Image (cartoon, rainbow, N blue to C red):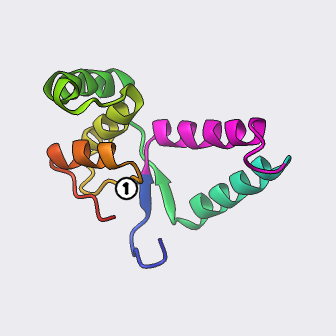
Amino acid sequence: MKAKRKALTLTPLSEYELSNALRFAEFRKGIALGEVALFWSQFEADRASGRLAIKICNLAEVVEEAKRISAMHTLTGGHRGFDILHVASALVVHAKEFLTFDANQKKLAQAEGLVVPL
């Protein structure tokens, strides 16, 4: 993030998944009680500073793109629905790069022409 000059672009889907993942981590005792608020305030600070930007996209368009991606790749690659939705969202907002720590999602993003730098 520090090396990037441009803001990291997220979609509302990514923002939602992050907020839910934080709450779920606290529920499962993966993070301490109250840390959701701390992590979320750090997220909001990054957003306010311009390091993060939320790009709005049309959900119906994302789902249509996800259906296309699923038809093309799931039988041969075994991709999960939310992973496909994230790749579809990136394509709908015309992203060039896609960040993920998931090896299978990385393959899908690359198959769809996105650059995955990690």
Question: Residue type at mark 1?
Answer: Leu
In the picture as drawn, the residue positioned furthest to the right comes out as 33
**Does the magenta segment cover residue 15?**
yes
Q: Position of residue 54 (x, y in %)?
A: 47, 48
- Please determine whether, in this image, residue 71 is positioned above or below residue 16: above
**Does the magenta segment cover residue 41?**
no
Q: What residue is shown at x 54% (from left), y 37% (from top)?
A: 17
Residue range corresponding to the magenta coloring: 10-32
Residue receiving disc 1: 99
Q: What residue is shown at x 43% (from left), y 60% (from top)?
A: 8
Estimate how packed mark 1 is, as few (under 14), some (14 to 19) or many (20 or more) residues with alpha carbons within 10 Å: some
Q: What residue is shown at x 65% (from left), y 55% (from top)?
A: 44
Query: Is 13 in front, or is 48?
Result: 13
Q: What residue is shown at x 22% (from left), y 58% (from top)?
A: 115
Q: Position of residue 41 (x, y in %)?
A: 73, 56
- Please determine whether, in this image, residue 5 is positioned above or below residue 22: below
Quarter containing the C terminus = bottom left
Q: Position of residue 2 (x, y in %)?
A: 49, 77
| Left or right: 45 as drawn, with respect to 85 | right
